[in-house]
Image: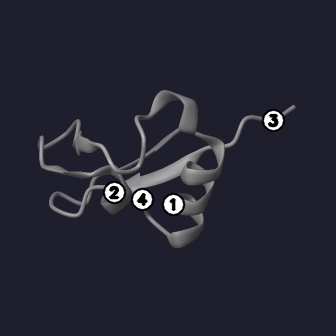
Amino acid sequence: MEEAYVRLLCPECKKGWESTPTQLPPHTTTYHCPNCHASRRLAEFTRTDRDLQTLKGLQ
């Protein structure tokens, strides 16, 4: 079985990365960019609507 992943993109510094939904907090939680430490809801870091739906569906 393959594990799903979500693509994330910081809205401030534009750093992109991938993570598995199980390694992330709920999408409504305040999340901090590992690069610039910008703070926003995790949902705002998802790159696409599909990434957000994957995150919501697998948590």
Q: Earlier in the sequence, mark 2 or mark 3?
A: 3
The percent position of residue 34, horizontal first and vertical second, equals: 23, 36
Please report whichever mark, 1 or 4, sits nearer to the chain's N-terminal start: 4
Question: Disc 4, disc 2: CB below 8 Å?
Answer: yes
**Dot 3 or dot 4, earlier in sequence:** 3
**Left or right: residue 4 compared with residue 42:** right
Q: Residue under circle 4? A: 46
Label 4's element? loop
Front residue of 59 and 15: 59
C-beta proximity under 8 Å, tags 1 and 4: yes
Work out how far the residue at label 2 is from the one at label 3, CA to CA, in angstroms. 23 Å
Q: Position of residue 5 (x, y in %)?
A: 61, 44
Callout 1: SS: helix
Residue 20 numbered mark, or none: none
Q: Amino acid at mark 1?
A: Leu
Measuring from the top left, give residue 18's x and y in whole percent. 49, 43
**Label 3, on which residue?**
2
Query: How far, Cα to Cα, is label 1 from label 4?
Result: 6 Å
Q: Which residue is mark 2?
A: 45
Quadrant of the snapshot with the C terminus: top right
Identify which residue is drawn at 42% across, 41% down. Answer: 26
Question: Which residue is at 12% across, 48% downward?
Answer: 38
Q: Residues within 10 Å of mark 1 (few under 14, many from 20)?
A: many
Q: Is residue 35 above or below residue 40?
A: above
| Mark sitting on residue 52 | 1
In 3D space, how far apart are the residues under numbered discs 4 and 2 (Cα atoms)?
4 Å
